Image: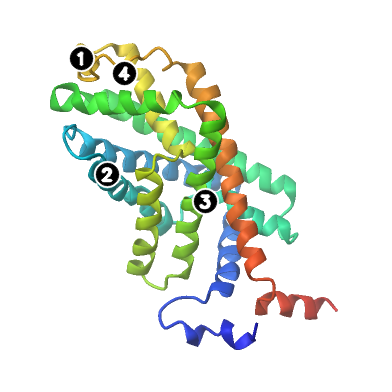
Amino acid sequence: MEESEYQVSDYVSAVAPPQIIDVAQKGLKGKASKGLGTIFISAMFAGAMIALGFVFFTTVNTGMGDVPFGIKKLLGGFVFSCGLGMVVLTGADLFTSTSMTTLLAIENKLSPSRLLTHWLVVYCGNFVGALLVVFGLYGAGTAQQADGAWGAVIVSTATAKVNHGWFEALLLGIFCNVMVCLAVWLSFAGRSLTDKIVAVTLPIALFVGSGFEHSVANMFMIPFGLLLKAQGNPDIIAATNGLDLSNLTMGGFLWDNLLPVTIGNIIGGSIVALGMLAMNPNRPSLKAEKEAAK
């Protein structure tokens, strides 16, 4: 492949694909190099933003029982994309996209210990941020909207998530984070606010509309469902139309969903990172690094 194919001038308004790796590595390196306290706070905000994206999803899906399946999925996926959009535009730390720091580890630009520490802090911060939204909305009585139908969407969605088989949840987690990381990757190519928003929207709408599993989103949806089940509000329970809630338990959340989905998300993010490196083995910056090392 000729180096001329790598010139930015060939791309009128976007970063050239091989150069996106350099942009991504610079951004990911900056995130992983921050102080752990800063990372945790950033991750809390990211977890809250993803939770708020699912709040919008829930509101839009409330009362849509008679709407055709595909239309409902399209609308839900489209509005949820605002969650990742906020994460991308604020630079907050989200576990799913953080899994792409394997880009750095593969080329020895980040130590394995720092990579794992970064992942753990971001994961915990995301969890705390998502739970803060859960408890805030619970205290605000948001779930009682529309005669309990809003809360019923939370409970039914949470129940569907814990009813996946373990391997099924793993695969759905892989597909989810392939799409999330591709969305973030495409946003790296954007040069303007509009570019980045457009880049994020469709891949995220695809993952949500297809029912793929996102670990951080589930840190909001399933705990909220558990809380509403425990509360036993008659309006909310009645609005679920007799749904079997027996699998909606803490064990179902942690073992049947969060664990396999988290592993799947890590695999999905690593697939994107490895794939992008494999697709661009001769990028100019890598050649320059090799020449400098001689």
Near-viewer residue (61 or 143): 61
* Number of the label disc, if any, that sits on residue 70: 2
Instruction: Answer left or right for 31 relative to 203.
Output: right
Q: Earlier in the sequence, mark 1 or mark 2?
A: 2
Point out which mark residue 91 bears: none
SS at mark 1 in the image: helix
Q: What residue is at 54 percent from the left and 73 percent from the top?
A: 17
Way the structure is coloured: rainbow
* Residue 166: quarter of image: top right
Judging by the rendered image, the residue that carries numbered circle 1 is: 238
* 235 to the left or right of 209: left
Q: Secondary structure at mark 2?
A: helix
The residue under label 4 is which amino acid type? Leu
Residues at circles 2 and 3 in contact by the CB criterion of under 8 Å: no
Q: Secondary structure at mark 4?
A: helix
Q: Whole-percent x and y of residue 260? A: 57, 32
Seen at 35% across and 18% down, the residue is: 227
Q: CA distance from mark 3 to mark 1?
A: 37 Å
| Rendering coords of residue 255 (x, y %) | 55, 23
Residue at image location 82% in from the left, 76% down from the top? 293
Q: Is residue 155 above or below residue 191?
A: above
Kindly identify the amino acid type of the residue bearing the numbered disc 2.
Gly
Residue highlighted by disc 4:
228
Picture coordinates of residue 245, whole percent (x, y): 36, 15
Q: Amino acid at mark 1?
A: Ala
Measured Cα–Cα span from mark 2 to mark 3: 22 Å
Residue at screen point 44% across, 23% down = 163
Q: Earlier in the sequence, mark 3 or mark 4?
A: 3
In the rendered image, which residue does mark 3 sit on? 178
